[in-house]
Image (cartoon, rainbow, N blue to C red):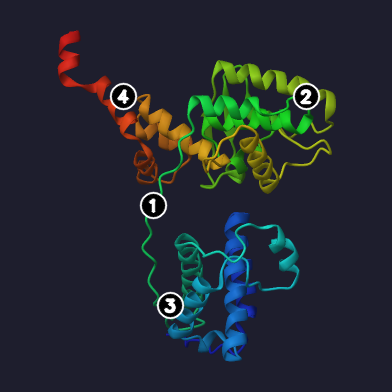
Amino acid sequence: MPKILKPKRDLQFYIEDFMEDCHIRGLSKKTLGSYEGTLKLFSKFLMEEYGTALLSEVKSEQIEEYIKFTKERGKYSYVSEDRTVKLNNPAGRKDFGKTVSDTTINNYIRNIKVFFNWAVNKRLIKKSPVKVQFVKTKRKAKEEITDLEFKALVQAIDTTKFSEYRDYVIIQLIMDTGMRLGETLALQCDDVDIERRSILISADITKGKKDRYVFFSNTMAGILRRWLQYKDRYCNNDTLLFCTKHDTEVGVRCFERNFRIYKTRAGIGKNITPHGLRNNFARRALVSGMDIYTLSRILGHSSVTVTEKAYLDLTVTDIRKNYQRFSPLENMQRR
């Protein structure tokens, strides 16, 4: 049996190896960023607190101390590099220093587990030192956006401006199809078939790395036709369905910032996000009678189990309306 290597290089060396391996495996930019951010912070913590960050010397107690430190430090208050301070813009953040959520803590634990499992598989260490348990979290139901609130949202957008007209179309497309924001912003014109009212989301932009189709309504088809005619007059980018006036792809953070502005204009105080529109699509589809298997495929979930979580956001009113359609006695009377 091959002997376990005794790595004497510091953690950062192996983090770079790990990141290269993840990149080769085709993991998403979001996942890569999450891994790298967590591991760099962990490596810095070990150096500052213990004066060493050798892979073979990491102890379970040190990992537990790091998780405890993470819980106590507050959001954006600890960075791996000085340049990150400017990117985080602490002066402009209302949540700077606030409690790090249990969900974020679990992401850190998961990322560290993945890294040390990789090190075991590469025979760099015999056993993973990660023993810390995930934090139990209470799932918060996503906020519902009512018909009136959604109409107020889109009416608050100034469609005489290029960027706002573009966002007006994006918001309605997400609500009508249930696409993820990142998928929507990466769409190409050739992906959209207006006549068949379908969109091909290619594997290279989906979370699950598989091609899938979503569909849209006649109303949305009209909105897209008008958008394409308008876009052709102002943009030279014939590839992207949505772009900036400089012909570049719209950034997720940029769109999320715009969305908050529109929400404020509309007087919506709820914690609605672009991803919340996708969740509302799922809830409305279920209430309207769509079966969960069809919905799961449209949403691009890895399994029906993931889709079932959408049921947790059904309100009592939703359930009451849905029940009336399936009442055995009512159906007997109709026959």
Q: Nearer the viewer, residue 10 or 157?
A: 157
Q: Mark 3 and 4 residues: CB-CB less than 8 Å, in contact? A: no
Q: Nearer the viewer, mark 3 or mark 4?
A: 4
| Mark pair 2, 3: CA separation | 55 Å
Location of residue 221 by image quarter: top right
Measured as percent of width and height from the top left, residue 113 is found at: 46, 71
The earlier-in-sequence mark between 2 and 3 is 3
The earlier-in-sequence mark between 1 and 2 is 1
Would residue 176 be visible to someone looking at this image? no
Would residue 320 be visible to someone looking at this image? yes
Question: Residue at 78% of width from left, 37% of height from top?
Answer: 244
Q: Which numbered disc covers residue 321?
A: 4
| Mark pair 2, 4: CA separation | 39 Å
| Mark pair 1, 2: CA separation | 40 Å
| Mark pair 3, 4: CA separation | 47 Å
Label 4 sits on what residue type? Lys
Question: Residue at 68% of width from left, 29% of height from top?
Answer: 157
Q: Quadrant of the C terminus?
A: top left
**Residue marked by disc 1:** 139
The earlier-in-sequence mark between 2 and 4 is 2
**Residue marked by disc 2:** 160
Position of 190 compared to 286: left or right? Answer: right
Instruction: Give the crowd class for mark 3: few <14, some 14-19, many >=20 residues within 10 Å.
Output: many
The earlier-in-sequence mark between 4 and 1 is 1
